[in-house]
Image: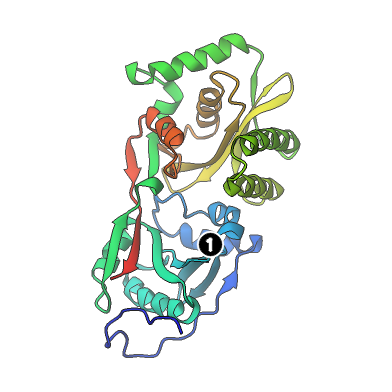
Amino acid sequence: MARKLFISQNFYSGRVDNINLQKLTCTDKPTFDKFFGSRYCEHSGYTFTNFFMWRKMRDYSWAVEDEVLYIFSTNEKNFAAWQPIGAQEKLQEAITKILHVAEENRGERQFKFVVVEKSFAEELEKYPHAKFNITAERDRFDYVYLVQDLINLSGRKFHGKKNHLNAFKKKYPDAKYMPITEELIPKCREELNIWAEARKLANPDNPFIGYEQAAINEIFDHFDAFKLKGGAILINDKVVAFTFGERLNSDTAVIHVEKADQNIRGIYAAINQNFVEREWSDMIYINREEDMGIDGLRRAKESYRPIKMIEKFNATLA
């Protein structure tokens, strides 16, 4: 029998209704959008696109109860809860319901809250019926940039980026930027497959590459329905870079994916600058998500000089 969660005896004096969990499908987007759009969220993970992309890898389940959205994910070791989305006055009761769901469903797995915002970590700190060990997850912090910095690349701090971009323009004067449409998606899939196969050869034991390739292809299957904005750079009618994202909140866009032929100097600078300028010039910030603790990715994201980092936290019962 699984060890009971460590909570005080006066954990909850009333009745806790069962939450009817269901698996995530593409038809759930309106429900998720309603909750995510009801608040100013800076956490890049809280878009339906992100949850849909990674649903097979993380085995998401979800429910709405009393106007609160609950989301859980599982693997062999952990039964995890994402922060509930609802009115602030309902969050303490939501924590109670989450602990009951975990007790009923975790089996031998460890329970934890994963990558929650600072505001919800504070809710956990004041929860009266249990104590939590809360730790910052630096590998999951989001990088946020000023839109105008990414467009203009002005000043000494962006000198290297500007040089790469100018070198690309000089060598490929006929390269063109195009917004992603249904007609362009097959060419983007071709570049995705080239990108993925090269990385599988270099990292044959890394299952994440295959997950990501499949996830991006699924997004392409639903691109218009998900209301995403995307852009691609073509050389000789061949897509050599593509990216897509969406509005995260009233002043921020989030970039979900950016893939390019790394053998072309300046191609990443070109797709980044073009996409932001053409599609997101009306925003103030760009959230380029986390670095997942990958050294090269961290250096690349830091090199664009983020204006702020969005902190995220994990929490386990003490």
Q: Is residue 149 above or below residue 197?
A: above
Q: In the rendering, at what x and y percent does residue 152 appear?
A: 43, 21
Using the image, determine if residue 215 lies above or below residue 29.
above
Where is residue 55? Give x, y as percent.
59, 59
List x then y, in percent, for residue 302: 37, 32
User: Is residue 118 in view from this perspective?
Assistant: no
Q: Is residue 48 left or right of residue 131?
A: right
**Which residue in the structure is indicated by mark 1?**
32
Q: Residue furthest bottom?
A: 14
- Outermost residue toward the top? 170
Q: Is residue 66 above or below residue 275?
A: below
**Mark 1 secondary-structure assignment:** helix
Which amino acid lies under the numbered mark 1 shown in the image of this protein? Answer: Phe
Residue 160 quadrant: top left
Between residues 47 and 210, which one lies in front from this camera angle?
Answer: 210
Seen at 65% across and 48% down, the residue is 219
Q: Neighbour class for label 1 at 10 Å: few (<14), some, many (≥20)?
A: some
- Foreground of the two, 210 or 124: 210
